[in-house]
């Protein structure tokens, strides 16, 4: 089979025509997946379908034309397949035009119904064309091809042109470049629709008079070349519009992210302010609590303790008054013993409220006295060790560290089920490290229902900008470590990095 230069140009033209339509369909399909600005995603689906189906129809024409030129019989299923793709592509173009005018609140797929209506009219006209008694039977496939262009392609292209024109007007004030691309694409569709008035010669009116041969005689160029150029022009503008829409989406996304970050920063700022307010409130509460404890401690020590001492002395004096009455002496002795027990209980209460050693001598003596108290020492053995440059600290830091040690040892006594524990404090230049450890029952940190003891420790440590570490597991004991700054309002310096060990010499 030999083809001349003009025929090869025709085949190349159909190939480029199909390639342009396929590229347009692919671009629109990609735009659908990105939620385009042209309209909602459903709007561009018919346009993508139009590009794909019409491209296949044009490429099938490349297979059919050489057989026509060589007068070779063409399989009828091939012709019907080509006509089917062409018809469905024009129906999809019509659906795109209708979809663009669909009311925003309407839920019925009007574009589908209208497209089916156009196809129904197209089928009815083809049926009527078969019923009409012709003097000589027409070529049904050529008539069907011409009717597809008249009844489907022309109105579909015009609707698409009007839809894109409306989008151009919509974006004219906000995005001039995007509006221009829509407007040029609308002109491309309009001219593409007018090109469908020149189908191949067929028996259906007005194809016998206005057809592709007439256009070529008048202009000297084939109508297929015009359609190819219009497809390339329309495809280029639609892809350009897609790129502009993508840039617009990126700008909107960037702006939305900036607004989100600004909102998050505002929320974070508010949270930090509230956190600082909560810390200040808790600081005032702790100070007021310690002051109240100190006041109650002084009153108990100065008033109640003296009264108990006086009562005990009076009972001792009564022993000499009652003489040798054994019953009276026994009652007086019991009363003296009760006064002594009350004095010891009162002493423990005074010490728990506010130990005098903490105010008078500092943190280390107060911690040492805490571990030596009979209330602790008669139930568990507590080892105490103070290391580093021992010195007085800010009263708030000393109070927090003492209360943490007191609460931690109380937890050991109540829950650890052990007979020993250790308390260590290490003074460094910029930090103070307090550690309470035991080898008792242990627990799983972070579980709910563990009481308010650890929560109170955490709140107090946060109050002085400290760091709390809890290392525990069931059956493996517990170690509570508090790292506090050496001065108020100071941030704990980071842990010094361990120096790498010297490399071992190799043999």
Image: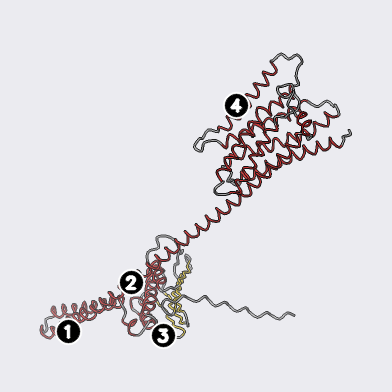
- Name the mark on residue 117: 4
Mark 4 or 2: in front is 4
Q: Label 3: few (<14), some or many (≥20) within 10 Å?
A: few
Residue in the image at 24% along x and 77% along y: 341
- Name the mark on residue 391: 3
Mark 3 or 4: in front is 4
- Mark 1 vs 2, N-terminal side: 2
- Name the mark on residue 114: none
- Mark 1 vs 4, N-terminal side: 4
Mark 1 or 2: in front is 2
Helix, strand or loop at label 2? It is: helix
> Residue 51: x percent and y percent?
68, 38
- Mark 3 vs 4, N-terminal side: 4
Helix, strand or loop at label 4? It is: helix
Q: Nearer the viewer, residue 179 or 480?
A: 179
Helix, strand or loop at label 1? It is: helix
Q: Find the distance from the CA under tag 3 to the CA under tag 1.
A: 41 Å
Residue designated by label 2: 284
> Residue 459: x percent and y percent?
39, 68
Image quarter in which the C terminus is found: bottom right
Q: Label 1: few (<14), some or many (≥20) within 10 Å?
A: few
Image quarter in which the N terminus is found: top right
Q: Nearer the viewer, residue 235 or 419?
A: 235
Q: On screen, 333 above or below 285?
A: below
- Name the mark on residue 313: 1
Mark 1 or 4: in front is 4
């Amino acid at each position: 089979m030999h083809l001349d230069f003009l025929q090869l140009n025709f085949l190349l033209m159909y190939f480029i025509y199909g390639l342009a339509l396929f590229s347009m369909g692919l671009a629109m399909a990609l735009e659908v997946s990105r939620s385009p600005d042209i309209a909602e995603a459903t709007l561009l689906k018919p346009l993508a379908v139009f590009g794909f189906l019409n491209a296949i129809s044009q490429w099938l024409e490349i297979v059919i034309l050489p057989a026509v030129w060589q007068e070779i019989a063409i399989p009828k299923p091939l012709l019907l397949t080509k006509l089917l793709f062409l018809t469905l592509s024009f129906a999809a173009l019509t659906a795109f035009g209708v979809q663009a005018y669909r009311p925003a609140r309407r839920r019925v797929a009007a574009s589908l119904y209208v497209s089916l209506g156009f196809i129904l009219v197209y089928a009815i006209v083809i049926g009527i064309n078969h019923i009409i008694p012709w003097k000589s039977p027409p070529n049904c496939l050529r008539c069907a091809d011409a009717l597809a262009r008249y009844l489907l392609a022309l109105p579909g292209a015009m609707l698409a042109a009007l839809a894109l024109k409306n989008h151009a007007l919509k974006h004219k004030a906000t995005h001039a470049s995007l509006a221009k691309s829509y407007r040029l694409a609308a002109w491309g569709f309009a001219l593409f629709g007018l090109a469908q008035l020149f189908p191949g010669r067929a028996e259906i009116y007005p194809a016998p008079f206005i057809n592709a041969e007439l256009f070529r005689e008048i202009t000297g160029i084939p109508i297929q070349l015009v359609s190819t150029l219009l497809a390339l022009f329309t495809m280029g503008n639609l892809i350009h519009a897609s790129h502009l829409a993508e840039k617009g989406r990126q700008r909107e996304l960037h702006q939305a992210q900036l607004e989100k970050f600004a909102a998050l920063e505002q929320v974070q700022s508010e949270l930090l302010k509230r956190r600082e307010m909560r810390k200040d409130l808790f600081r005032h509460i702790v100070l007021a609590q310690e002051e109240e404890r100190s006041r109650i401690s002084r009153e108990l020590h100065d008033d109640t303790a003296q009264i108990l001492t006086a009562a005990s002395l009076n009972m001792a004096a009564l022993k000499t008054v009652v003489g040798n009455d054994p019953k009276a002496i026994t009652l007086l002795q019991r009363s003296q013993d009760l006064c002594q027990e009350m004095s010891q209980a009162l002493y423990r209460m005074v010490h728990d409220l506010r130990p005098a050693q903490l105010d008078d001598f500092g943190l280390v003596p107060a911690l040492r006295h805490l571990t030596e108290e009979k209330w602790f020492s008669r139930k568990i053995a507590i080892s105490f060790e103070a290391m580093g440059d021992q010195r007085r600290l800010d009263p708030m830091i000393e109070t927090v560290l003492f209360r943490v040690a007191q609460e931690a040892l109380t937890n050991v006594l109540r829950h650890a089920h052990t007979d020993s524990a250790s308390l260590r404090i290490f003074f460094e230049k910029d930090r103070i490290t307090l550690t309470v450890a035991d080898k008792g029952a242990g627990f799983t940190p972070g579980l709910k229902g563990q009481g308010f003891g650890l929560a109170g420790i955490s709140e107090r440590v946060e109050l002085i900008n400290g760091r709390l570490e809890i290392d525990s597991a069931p059956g493996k004991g517990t170690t509570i470590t508090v790292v506090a700054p050496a001065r108020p309002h100071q941030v704990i310096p980071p842990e010094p990095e361990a120096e790498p060990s010297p490399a071992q010499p190799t043999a």
